[in-house]
Every structure is written in C-alpha cells, then in structure tokens.
Image: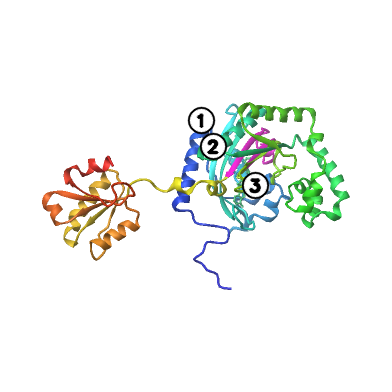
C-alpha cells in the first residue's frame, strides 16, 4: 500500500494558526499563574530509557504494555518516546541532583509533546501535548488541595468556567493491598461475565477493572467493594481533610469511588478534571499523589503530587474567535514598478519601528495587489504612487471591518509612523 507522505502520521497533527495561538496563550497563562505558586520550568528530553517508564508507570498499565513508542536506537539501546511527563521529571531530579537537603518543596512545571500509540479519535491523539506540574517533598492534604486549586485556577483563567473535579483516594500501600484482595475476590465471582480485557486485568492489574469502559464491566463494578471501606483511619482522615479544604476554597468536586487512574505510581489523592457541560466527556487533566515514585527510581524517599492538562483537549473547548489575531496588518503597496524602491523604504521604516507590515509589490496592477493584501487579512493599506511621492504623502486605505472600511485618507509621509502607532 502506498503511503501518503504528505499527511502527518496517523494520530498526529500540525499545530498552526488559531490553534497555535490558543496553545501559546494557555502556556503563557499557566506559567504566570504557576510562578505565583512557586513553580519553575523544566524541560526534559522527549526520549528516555524505556526502563524509566516501565519502572515508574508500571509494566501492567495500558500505557506501558500497549501504548509506548519503544524502539532500539543504533547503539541497540531500548528507548521510548515519553508517554507522559512525570517519570522523566523524576529521572531528571535524580540525574541532576536537584534535591539537596533543604530545598524542598521542589515545584517544577513543564509542557511539550507526549506520545501514546492509542486509537485516534476526538481528543485522543498519538502525539499530544501536556502541561504538567510536580510538587515534590511536601506531604499534606492542604498541598493536595492547593494542587487542585492551581489546576482549577489555570482552567478558569483560560476561560473554562464549568470545570468539575472528580476525586478519590487510593490510600497508603497497605490499604490498597487490602482493597485489591477484596476486589479480586468480588470480580472472581463474576469472572465469566467480565470483558476479555478485564479477565486479563483480574490476573495482572485488578484495580484497572474499575476503570473499564465496557458496559457489562461497568454494571459489575457498580456493586464492587468501595475503597473507603478499606482505607486506614489515617488515610481516611487525610482524604476528608483534602475534601474539606477544597470546599473551603470553593472548588466544586465530586467523589468518584471508581476513579483509579491509568498509571501505577499513585497513592492517596487522585483526581481528574472534566467539563460539566457535556461538550467533551473524557478528562482534560488528571493527577495525584505519588509517595514512592522517586525512591522507586533510585532517588530520595520523598512524596510528591502533580497533574497534567491535555492541551489538545483544552484547546478544543476554547472559542476560536477569541484567538483570531486582532492586531492590524499593514500592507505597503507600490502602485507600479516605478514606486517599488520608495515603497520598500517605507516598509523598512515601519518594520524598524516594530510595527507588523507586509510588502506587496508582486501583482500585475494595483487591484491585483489589493486582492493579495486582502487575502493576507490586511487591515490597512499604505499606497505609494507617483502623486504620493511627489507630495511626500501616503494614501491610507482601511480594509478592516469598522466604520472606516473602504475610506481613504492622505497622511503626510513624515507623520506615518505616529499615525500607525495610534490606530
Ligand atoms: P494522564 O491522565 O495520563 O496523566 O494524562 C493527563 C492528560 O493528558 C489527560 O487528562 C488528557 O487530557 C491528556 N491525554 C492523555 N492521553 C492523551 C491522548 N492520547 N490524546 C490527547 N490527550 C491525552 C498523566 O500523564 C500524569 N503524568 C499526570 C500527573 C502528573 N500525575 C502526577 N503528576
């Protein structure tokens, strides 16, 4: 089969125009807000040793067992395109010795492309972008609530006002082990009725059955034991304090006792961010606490909490109109060949005053050039003809959709920069 090399690889797409503006706006807004919360940026490589993800995310997760882009490099080393950002950030903290005795909590933010070999569909891509935050070294229910508040503040700041936080607790390891024993017992009774995938999960990673999208599995899950009945007293107290603090913050949340998240490194608080208006049902962000992740990778035994927002999903929910460029696009147009040099000089003067401009000198006649300028979304034309040169003026024509549209104005050439700076 011949492949169309002019299309991007399946599940991947080019980012440009309005979408790029949205992307940049979200990043800029998030950087500004996270700075207030004490985060500083980090950028880690897009590829890591495969083991970094196997050890942190867990071999039995869908992400590691099915979705990773893993290949051997020319040195026969197994490397993987990062499916998420947390593992790489933990690896970077260890490699660079970023944690020294008393610089905790360490708060890092990052953004960039991630790769998962998933079935592409609306809001689900094989290359997508995440904006992530990790807060390492401080374990307290208040920190968990502050983390969720940060996520909420970013979403609100970019224009998502109906975000719902779904929250759950996975407790400490012992609570989780007891709970897993209970659900294995429960799901074993219904093993025949479980989907093929959940039958495998029952053997390998039973918690993940709770996350199944299969209708039959969902019905069985609705009657399954609830994790709260297995959380230790202190785990329960911790979780209740997270919830109370969220209420004090005025953050809308709902407890979802089937929420388990798709990555194995979590303990205690886990959460997902969704929009309530039904525009898109999958999570636009998610995260949680990880007690043992750093130590599992060979780093210090400190707990952390973080989350990531999926930028494509968030961009999809933002109104395109708001992100159309609003600035004036000025086109300098010589009427004929004879005025090209003079108009070019004007164009350069405009650029050197940091004003965006285009130079439209190709085109058989003036109306063709105006047509080209219009296709470039020009809002103001500066026409330079022989009369203008003689009188040291410029003819200004408005193309923007305002009351000035179609109007012409003669402006003294010496005043043109001042004029452009005030429109
Ligand atoms: P995650 O829930 O796997 O968590 O991904 C976070 C977000 O990335 C999702 O809520 C979704 O918006 C977006 N996302 C995931 N997969 C895709 C996809 N195939 N296409 C488009 N968007 C996608 C993590 O990755 C954790 N590292 C979050 C975290 C940080 N936990 C602690 N710290």
Q: Which of 71 and 107 is in front in this view?
A: 107
Q: Spatial distance from mark 1 to mark 3, Cα to Cα?
A: 31 Å
Which residue carries the number 1 mark? Answer: 36
Percent position of residue 183, x then y: 83, 44
Looking at the rendered image, the quarter that the N terminus falls into is bottom right
Mark 3 lies on a secondary structure that is helix
Check the image and report above or below for 237 versus 410: above
Q: Does the magenta stretch include residue 287?
A: yes
Q: What stretch is highlighted in magenta?
A: 286-309
Secondary structure at badge 2 equals helix
Identify the residue under disc 2: 156
Dot 1 or dot 2, earlier in sequence: 1
Locate residue 398 relative to residue 321 in the image: left or right. Answer: left
Question: In the displayed structure, does residue 34 sit left or right of residue 91?
Answer: left
Mark 1 or mark 2: which is in front? 2
Q: Is residue 33 left or right of residue 333?
A: right
Residue placed under numbered mark 3 in the picture = 52
Q: Where is residue 320 in the image (x, y as percent from the top left)?
A: 47, 49
Quarter-wise, where is residue 412 in the image?
Answer: top left
In percent of the image, x 65 and y 48: which residue is there? 53
At 14% from the left edge and 56% from the top edge, which residue is drawn?
386
Instruction: Give the residue furthest to the right.
Output: 189
Question: Which of marks 3 and 1 precedes in the sequence?
Answer: 1
Q: Quadrant of the C terminus?
A: top left
Q: Earlier in the sequence, mark 2 or mark 3?
A: 3
**Is 29 positioned to the left or the right of 93 in the image?**
left
359 or 172, nearer to the observer: 359
Using a 10 Å C-alpha cutoff, classify the residue at mark 3 as few (fewer than 14 neighbours), some (14 to 19) or many (20 or more): some
Q: Is mark 1 on a helix, strand or loop?
A: helix
Q: Residue at x 72, y 52 (%)?
A: 213
**Residue farthest to the front, as pictured:** 403
Which one is in front, 361 or 110?
Answer: 361
């Amino acid at each position: 089969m011949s492949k169309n090399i002019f299309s991007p690889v399946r599940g991947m797409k080019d980012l440009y125009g309005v979408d790029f503006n949205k992307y940049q706006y979200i990043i800029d807004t998030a950087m500004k807000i996270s700075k207030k919360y004490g985060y500083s940026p980090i950028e880690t490589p897009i590829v890591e040793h495969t083991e970094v993800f196997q050890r942190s995310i867990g071999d039995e997760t869908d992400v590691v067992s099915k979705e990773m882009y893993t290949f051997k490099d020319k040195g026969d080393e197994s490397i993987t395109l990062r499916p998420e950002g947390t593992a790489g950030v933990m690896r970077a903290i260890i490699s660079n010795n970023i944690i020294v005795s008393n610089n905790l909590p360490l708060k890092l933010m990052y953004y960039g492309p991630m790769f998962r070999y998933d079935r592409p569909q609306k809001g689900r891509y094989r290359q997508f972008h995440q904006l992530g935050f990790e807060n390492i070294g401080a374990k307290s229910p208040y920190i968990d609530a502050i983390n969720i508040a940060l996520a909420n503040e970013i979403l609100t700041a970019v224009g998502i006002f109906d975000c719902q936080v779904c929250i759950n607790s996975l407790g400490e390891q012992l609570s989780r082990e007891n709970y897993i024993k209970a659900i294995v017992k429960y799901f074993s009774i219904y093993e025949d009725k479980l989907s093929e995938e959940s039958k495998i999960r029952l053997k390998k990673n039973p918690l993940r059955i709770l996350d199944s999208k299969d209708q039959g599995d969902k019905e069985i899950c609705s009657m399954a034991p609830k994790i709260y009945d297995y959380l230790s007293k202190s785990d329960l107290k911790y979780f209740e304090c997270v919830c109370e603090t969220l209420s004090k913050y005025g953050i809308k949340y709902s407890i979802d006792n089937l929420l388990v998240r798709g990555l194995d490194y979590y303990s205690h608080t886990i959460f997902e961010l969704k929009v309530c208006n039904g525009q898109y049902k999958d999570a636009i962000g998610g995260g949680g606490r990880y007690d043992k992740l750093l130590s599992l990778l060979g780093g210090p035994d400190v707990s952390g909490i973080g989350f990531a927002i999926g930028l494509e999903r968030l961009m999809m929910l933002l109104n395109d109109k708001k992100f159309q460029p609003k600035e004036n696009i000025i086109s300098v147009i010589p009427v004929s060949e004879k005025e090209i040099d003079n108009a070019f000089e004007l164009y350069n003067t405009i650029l050197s005053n940091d004003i965006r401009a285009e130079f439209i000198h190709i085109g058989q006649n003036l109306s063709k050039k105006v047509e080209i300028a219009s296709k470039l979304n020009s809002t103001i034309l500066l026409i330079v003809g022989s009369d203008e040169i003689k009188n040291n003026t410029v003819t200004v024509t408005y193309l923007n959709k305002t009351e000035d549209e179609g109007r012409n104005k003669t402006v003294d050439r010496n005043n043109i920069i001042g004029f452009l700076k005030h429109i």
